[in-house]
Image (cartoon, grey):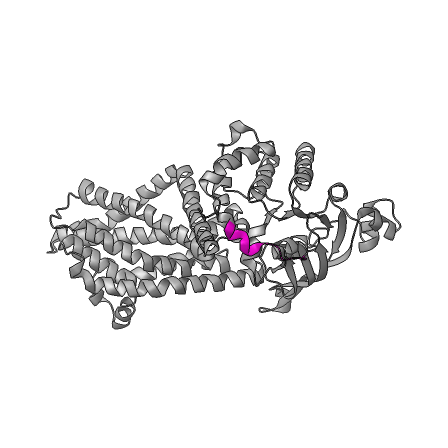
Amino acid sequence: MRALMGTMRAELVGAGGVVERNAYLTKRYIWWDVAWFVWTVANTLTIVFIAKGIEATGGTLDVNETMTTLLIGAVVWAYLGILFEFLMETVAWERWEGTIEYTFMAPLSRAMHLAGQGVFAIMYGLLRATFLFVICAFLFFDLVIPDANYVAALAVLMVASVSFIGIGMMMSVLPLISPEKGTQLGFVAQGTLLVVSGVYYPVEVLPGWMQAIATISPATYALDGIREAILEGQGLTAMWDELWPLMIIGVVSIPLGLWVFSRGEQYAKKHGKLKRSG
Amino acid sequence: MIDTQEAVMEAVPRRGDAAVEVRDLRKEFVSRDRKKGRFGKRTRVALDGVTFSLERGETVAILGQNGSGKSTLVRLLSTLLLPDGGSARILGHDVVAEHRAVRRVVNRVSVEASFFKKMSAAENLSYAARYYGMTSKQTREKIPEILGRVGFPRDRRDEPMENLSRGMQQKVALARALLTSPVVLLLDEPTTGLDPRSKLEVQDFIREIRTSHDSTILLCTHDLGEAEILAERVGILDRGRLLALEPADELKQRYGCGTLEEAFFKATGREFEAEEDEDDDREVMA
């Protein structure tokens, strides 16, 4: 029992090491991160301005509500981008720096290694998403969102993050299998996930087959839940319809993500791809 | 209070087990061969029935040219590769079936120092130690102590690794490996590319590890002098096959030569310095 507790403690310390490493790297690359954040803000603004553009060309819509709806989509897109980026970097950055062999030969279990990566990604992603939302909503557009329930919105995003991490684990195996093109394929997965999930429009406008895929995408429920919380001020109880599918997808996606990653790792070990040069 | 060292209990040596035991180890790599058409493939044998064992506390050097299979051997023992045949055990634990137990007792230093280059030496050592279950309380004193032991200047501990010389980086790599108190230390060309002074310093430190640490060392190198002065036994690995493994003097005697270089030549039928033009092979076999 004591040995088991010792092992668990060592695993937690190891996962903490992954968080610590990412904190060091973020600190060292902070100005690059600021530059990247400016790009994210610019990208978000181009999307939110679409609502104003429609109004200016004679369209009739509730500009404030449409802008908020678009902003939520853009913020979730940016948040998902950060989560996937960190998880993809589990392999890609390590390979680039040459540390991949040292990390993968350490006694830390892959589950805790990826968990550490996921925890930091969530913390960092939430921080950036909050800044992005505040800057765009209140500094640029002066949006009026009097009923917003930010705590409920944050809670939905946290629950959805479990599923996102599970999917991110599956994606992060791609650079392991294809050192040259694996990372780019992760962006394909991110875009595909959001296009079926109603990132800037209701899912109902999609073709039937895309709507079917939307039912298994955690981003669908995350976007619905966050919009309900911010636009309508819904609390967690009223959002049960979004929360239970997110929980189920989360419970399935984490072990599935770990399994996919372990298969990828076995493949890489078999074919000699677990090394710096690929 | 629970000591994280208890987590290592799973990896304690089994009575009577050698530190490293390799039996008929085989590894092949398959790569694309355009000469054989669109889907053509070729198979290169990186290790071909390698058998040897290391006793605890022993230092053994494996000599071989680029592409001879040295790095493949080290990566197999580090649990980074799956063998295609045979077995390898460290302290009695199979590197495939019991890889977690093996990882707790093995560490390595490779030809490239391999760090996050924007991070400092202390930061690189700190997060790496966590992967082995060492808490910040445990590393707070141990990291400065071990950096001091390898002769790393105190005032450069917080400098990004990219500002350090190759020799300095390699010392930090040695410190990283020793920080986790490995029972088996795998050194894959640790002095290649270093200037003469750094090379001597690294070799001195390896000597110190031999005397002060209870580590078993497998040193893969193509530096004959290094092998002779550091190792109790020297092996010759050529094209994936281990041709000999014995004390340097016996090796020279066996081939009737005055130097290790001549013995290598006789054993392999090739000049030691002659580099093979096998870049393609190296890509998959390194």
Would residue A136 appear left or right of B251 to someone viewing this image? Answer: left
Residue at the limit of the structure toward the top, as seen here = B155
Task: Return the residue nearer the eye: A86 or A210.
Answer: A86
Q: Where in the figure is residue A137, as x and y percent of width and height? A: 19, 45
- x and y percentages locating residue B7 in the rendered image: 50, 52
Residue A193 figure quarter: bottom left
Magenta residues, as a range?
A: B6-17
Is residue B15 highlighted in magenta? yes
Residue A248 shown left or right of residue B205 in the figure: left
Q: Residue at x 68, y 41 (%)?
A: B210
What's the residue at 26%, 54% (across, down)? A157
Asked whether residue B269 is in view, the answer is no
The image quarter containing residue B15 is: bottom right
Q: Residue at x 13, y 54 (%)?
A: A233
Q: Position of residue A41 (x, y in %)?
A: 28, 44
Point out residue B65 in the picture as x, y percentages from the top left corner: 72, 51
Q: Is residue A18 left or right of residue B206?
A: left
Q: Is B235 a magenta residue? A: no
Residue A173 visible in this rendered orientation of the protein:
yes
On-image quarter of the N terminus of chain A: bottom left
- The image shows residue A53, relative to residue B86, as above or below, that is above
Q: Quadrant of the C terminus of chain A?
A: bottom right
User: Residue sitting at 15 percent across and 46 percent down?
Assistant: A143
Q: Is residue B89 left or right of residue A10?
A: right
Judging depth in this view, the residue of A34 and B211 nearest the camera is B211
Whether B66 is drawn above or below B22: the answer is above
Query: Is residue A185 depicted above or below B222 in this figure?
Result: below
